[in-house]
Amino acid sequence: MNRFLEISQIQKRIDEFNLGPIDLKIEPGTITALIGNNGSGKSTLLKLIMNLAKPDMGNIKFFNKFVYGHDESWKKQVAYQPQTVIGWNPFTGNSLKEFISPLYPNWNEDQFNKMVSLLAIPLDKRYGKLSQGDQQKLSLALTLPRNTPLMLLDEPTSFIDIPSKKHFIDLVVDWMDQGERAIIMTSHQSEDIMKLADYLYVLQNGKMMGTFEKEELTESYMCYWMKCDLSVKPIPGEVSRENNRLISNNPSATETFFLENNLTYTTAKNMGMEEIITILLK
């Protein structure tokens, strides 16, 4: 299977901030969520992929072709929705669509019209006069219909209301079903991550913490409430403990230890994605 994107040992310094080294591979048919604390480098990484910023070291290949150089024809194969759009304020949605749609050979006019109707996007108002939510919805409606193999979405659900967010998630699922495609998205919304992402790529203060398969991750973390306070002895899989509450990222090893040491618990439950992300970023 051919990889859509390969990032190898990318590093970038911006003032006092250092990103990398970053290694990331994107396969078709996958959605990867970039997870990290504020200022961890998620948006910077997307800009590096789009060649909007130059790395200090490392390589980025899209369809086995380096993204650097004067030839940027490869950008027709990538749809990028930045967190903040610059230069759109004077233009209406209709004007923006007329500018953008000819740039992408597989532009889907029917999908654009469907999103406009579904998300109730006003196309006759200037972008700068729209609410933040409507700006975000218009930006998405100008991104998905480009019908490119790879889509980069920077905080796509910020500012939009709950019904529109549900519509967007359904639209993304449909979009992924239409061929060999992949998405890289950043999000602070754990619910969106749970519904959309296959993999989580975790960054902390510019450093790569690892890539995790979402389902394996959610099954790996368990919280136990013990019948008595725990001893000071370390427990296999232990991530943290407080009084009679213990969190484990290896439930099998933890429960074997409980059995061997006659320790019993009253309740055990899988942890939510938001809790797991908080632990990963500590």
Image: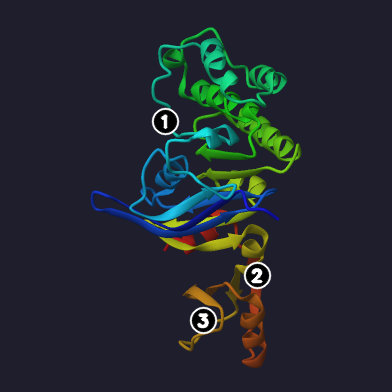
Pick the quarter of the image with the C terminus. Answer: bottom left
* Marks 3, 2: nearer the viewer: 2
Placement of the N terminus among the 4 image quadrants: bottom right
Residue holding disc 3: 229
Q: Report if the CB atoms under discs 1 and 2 are less than 8 Å apart.
A: no
Tell me the residue that label 2 is attached to.
Answer: 268
Query: Does residue 195 sit above or below 175 in this rendering?
Result: below
Secondary element type, mark 1: loop
Instruction: Identify the residue at horizontal 48%, vertical 75% (top origin).
Output: 243
Q: Can the viewer see residue 205 in this picture?
A: no
Residue type, numbered disc 1:
Thr
- Helix, strand or loop status at disc 3: loop
Instruction: Look at label 2 and name its amino acid.
Output: Ala
- Using the image, determine if residue 117 lies above or below residue 72: above
Q: Residue furthest front?
A: 70
- Residue highlighted by disc 1: 84
